[in-house]
Amino acid sequence: MTAPRPATVREDELRRLSRSPRKVASYLGDPYVRAGLRELPPELVLPVTVAVLKPEAVAGRRLERALRALDVRGFDVVGAWRFRFGVMLIRELWRYQFTNATEDKVDLVDRILTSGDSLLLVLRDRTWTPAGPPAAARLSGVKGSADPRKRSGSEIRAELAGPSVLLNFVHSADEPADVVRELAMLESATGLPVLGAVRRPGRVPGARLRALAGELYEQCPPHDLDEDASWARLAGCPHEPLAAAAMVRQAARQAARQSARQAARQAARQSASQAASQVARRSDRQAASPVSGWPGQQEAWTRIRHLLRAPGPPGDVLWDVLTVAAATIELSVPGLSVALDTVGAAPWQVSAVIR
């Protein structure tokens, strides 16, 4: 039997598990980190990580592709369970990242993650060595950005083609300190034996993973998660606020197309250099925008934003609403910042794990 570890987290232990001084300071008093480190010494945490394939991966039928992407990149599934997020679990898991979130973002994340079950995975890195980066940092690097504009073709999220920042299919812990925190939190919230999976030898059989994927698919019809197709379906749905919002968007897009044609005719009468300069400036403005943007977008959104709150969108258009919301809302409040910045793979790749 393993002897119980001290209840107090030591700073030197956390420095082995995080490259962020601010995170080390914050996690010294975090109850989930303290609970996790009572069960797991740092040397057991470094080769493992935790990931969640979220409800949009179920609706978008990405579970098998995500599992295959993890496998080919060297990650074995050593624990897998169905579970459903509750609002309090969402608040706790992203406690340090929601400090600059808009109300729309918080409401939408709640609605997405509570819409159905997710697949919780404990992963072991087959390639891990004491001289290399920990499993969590390596997965963070190969996972890629939540923002589609910042992904490269070799990353998991690029391969899965998540359509927007919030519909990105997969969450994983950034670095080992987050693995400890999230495993302890998930075990506390769900009752699942996730901490024990870290010590478990072998891997979950492929047949079991396929069965779990099948069970999840049975609870949720497939959806294309396509913004334009979702708006088109909403335009013909029987729910008046949704149909009205879709018509606002349709009229705005028609007006925008007409304006673009007029601008094109005007540009044709200008010199090529002037036209090119205008196009470049317009592209820069669009790239800097947090959402794709179109005339009338906010007007359409204000007609339906209340549906993100309880009781939520009608079930027959749930993923249409979630898809257009994810493509439309503002994500952060100007002037506010996250309490803890994301720590990517790079800080772990410049040196060996501190022993």
Image (cartoon, grey):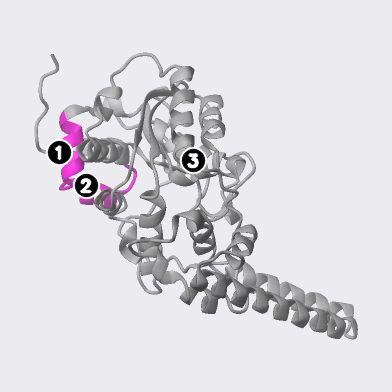
Nearer mark to the viewer, of 2 and 3? 3
Q: Residue 313 at what x, y percent from top left?
A: 43, 61
* Residue 102 visible in the current orientation: no
Task: Report the amino acid beneath label 2.
Answer: Tyr
Q: Which of marks 1 and 2 is nearer the N terminus?
A: 1
Q: Disc 1, disc 2: CB below 8 Å?
A: yes
> Which portion, as a residue range, is magenta?
18-38
Q: Residue 253 at what x, y percent from top left?
A: 68, 75
Q: Locate residue 31 relative to residue 274 in the image: left or right.
A: left
- In-front residue for pair 318/36: 318
Task: Report the amino acid beneath label 1.
Answer: Val
Q: In which quarter of the view is residue 35 placed?
A: top left
Label 2's element?
helix
Give the residue displayed 34% in from the left and 61% down from the top: 311
Q: Distance between the Cα atoms at labels 1 and 3?
A: 37 Å
Q: Residue 109 at what x, y percent from top left?
A: 39, 56
Nearer mark to the viewer, of 1 and 3? 3
Q: Disc 1, disc 3: CB below 8 Å?
A: no
Residue under label 2: 27
**Above or below for 200 versus 51:** above
The main secondary structure of the magenta stretch is helix
Residue under label 3: 58
Residue under label 1: 9
Q: Distance between the Cα atoms at labels 1 and 2?
A: 9 Å
Q: Residue 230 at what x, y percent from top left?
A: 59, 59
Label 1's element?
loop
Q: In which quarter of the view is residue 52 placed?
A: top left
Q: Locate residue 199 relative to residue 123 in the image: left or right.
A: left
* Residue 187 visible in the current orientation: yes
Task: Report the amino acid beneath label 3.
Answer: Val
Label 3's element?
helix
